Image (tube, rainbow, N blue to C red):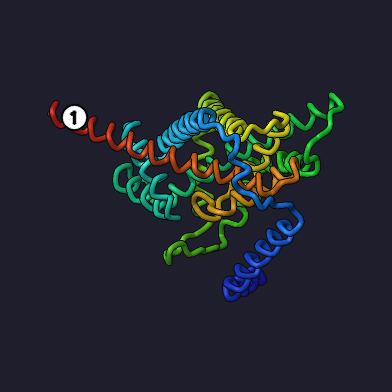
Amino acid sequence: MKYNYILNKFRKHRSIIKNLIYFLIFALIIFELSKRSISISITSYFENFNFYYFFIAVFFFIINSVFGAYLFFLITKYLSSIKLSLMRTFNIIFNGQFLDFFPFFGTLYKAKRLKSEAKISYIPFLSIYLALLEIGLLNISFFLSLIYFFLLFYNQDIPINNLVFFAYFFFFLIFGIFFIKKIYFSLLNKKLIYSIFNKPYDLFKIITIFFNLQNDILKNKLNFLKLILLDFVCHINLFITFLFIFKCYSVELNIIHILIIYLLFIFITQVKIVPKNYIIDELIGAYLISLGINDFGFGLIIMITLRCISLLSSTFLFLLFNFLFRKETLMIKKRN
């Protein structure tokens, strides 16, 4: 009874609580911005801009996107008896990424097509993102912890040490995901309904499917390792993209420092408030960069450059895989 009373109170005042959280986040951002130095001259950042490094960064971001799409493809195989071809799945994913220029359009597009073509309903579709989130957090937390202990062992200065410590703490918290099933299943008789686009979904049902998906993945340890390694390859390519963006502006920064900034940025932004996390990613990334070089303006330019690379990559892959998919479809029709 007490549980239902609290839940009903929460539902009644949900909009007020949500607005309060948004206000606190906005206030924190404004407070942090007020403490950071922002250079007035924007043109000074582009005086030594190197387009050669910029296009190398675009290339590695494209590779990252392809490996990420392949990881998504492998996870969908656990949820559907209908086996989509790799080309068709890539077409769905990259069309969705392109449509995510407008928040939620791409996610809805992917959900609709996977439901119609692979018979993956909306709740299992959401569980795919939970699985990707878990794999991503495991990888990022592991490497943050590894770097933290490495720097401690060699008595090196730890850039942004407090943030690294918290990430290291979350490393153990994330491993707890594998051990919370007993707590979860004890609550199965409860209902926790959330409305997504005015359609009610039971949160416990989504998590149940996620746990079942997790069990299917963990049944074969080699497959699980394959997913972890694929995610790791994605991070290598995205980190190289980060490095070359810094090189675009002829900034010499310690590679370990850039790596920690990258890992913390990815760790903090794993959970997206909206697809693509417009503005939010830029502010978080700029803040982390400014901790190292004390220039929020330059950090913002770096993050805007990364956003431009992301948009260029999404557009290129959208055009490429639409062309390849149509070509494959025509070839199949000719055979028949």
The residue lying toward the viewer, choosing from 306 and 67, is: 306
In the displayed structure image, the side of residue 139 where residue 112 appears, left or right:
left
Q: Residue at x 58, y 33 (%)?
A: 248
In this view, the residue in front, 154 or 118, is 154
Q: Quadrant of the C terminus?
A: top left
- Residue 123 versus residue 288: which sits nearer the camera? 288
- Position above or below: 6 against 142: below
Residue drawn at 64 percent across, 49 percent down: 41
Rendered view: 89 above or below 109: above
Percent position (x, y) of residue 190? 57, 62
Total marks drawn? 1
The reply to whether residue 31 is visible in this rendering is yes
Q: Quadrant of residue 294?
A: top right
Secondary element at image label 1: helix
Query: Can residue 227 be seen from the camera position used here?
Result: no
Q: Residue at x 84, y 25 (%)?
A: 153
Image location of residue 191, percent across then percent down: 54, 63
The residue under label 1 is which amino acid type?
Answer: Ile
The residue identified by callout 1 is 332
Residue 180 location in percent, x, y?
65, 46
